[in-house]
Image (cartoon, rainbow, N blue to C red):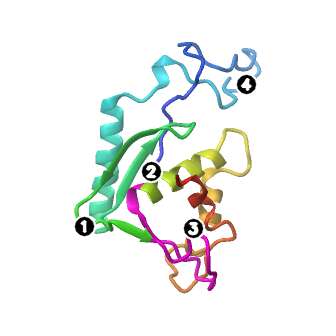
Amino acid sequence: MLFACGGGSNTGSDVGTNPGTPAGNGDSGCAGSCANANSFLTVDDIQKVIAQAVAEAQAQSKPATITVIDRVGNLLGAYRMTGAPVTQRVDSGRGISGGLEGLPIPSELTAIAKAITSVYFSSEGNAFGSRTAGQLAQEHFAPGDITAPSGPLFGVQFSQLP
């Protein structure tokens, strides 16, 4: 899963959507909505992010499906590496039946849904950031421990699936 900020204001303006904070108060001046035309990701930026993610996945010998979305959840790019799973099985490890439990979901959709969930949980200035959300929503609450049960918010990422 990979996500990046690409703007996303629906105002059509090339000026930031937040006037920022007054100068001289020691603040960075951005309250989470300071995107402008120069802060949007270009095609080259998106390709670079995907290439860096591919390089990292190759270094770890873990083929992955990589998605890049902007800060409001628009898909900017997706790439499934050779050898990456075509589908992901929804499994909370809690013996739940119904809903999406046990179903195979296309890996591109799960990567997009997880990235969107992370973006929706993250914003500047909030204590509940994307890292915390990622921990709570992952398949195994203790990362890398396949014997651990899912996080308390596992499944929320699938709420974004069409």
How many residues crowd around disc 1 within 10 Å: few (fewer than 14), some, or many (20 or more)? few
Earlier in the chain: of badge 3 and badge 1, it is: 1
* Span highlighted in magenta in the image: 89-108
Q: Which residue is mark 4?
A: 26
Residue 2, numbered circle:
2
The amino acid at mark 3 is Gln
Q: Are marks 3 and 1 in contact (CB under 8 Å)?
A: no
| Label drawn at residue 147 | none
Residue 98 coordinates in the image, percent (x, y): 62, 76
Left or right: where 23 falls relative to 55: right
Q: Is residue 14 left or right of residue 83?
A: right
Q: Which residue is mark 3?
A: 138
**Secondary structure beneath disc 1?**
loop
The type of residue carrying mark 1 is Gly
- Residue 28, how many percent across, how many down? 66, 26
Q: Earlier in the sequence, mark 4 or mark 2?
A: 2
Please tell me whether mark 2 sits on a helix, a strand or a loop.
loop
Residue position for label 1: 83
Residue at mark 4 to residue at mark 1: CA–CA distance: 49 Å
Q: Secondary structure at mark 3?
A: loop
Looking at the image, tell me whether mark 3 or mark 2 is earlier in sequence order: 2
Asked whether 9 falls inside the magenta stretch, the response is no
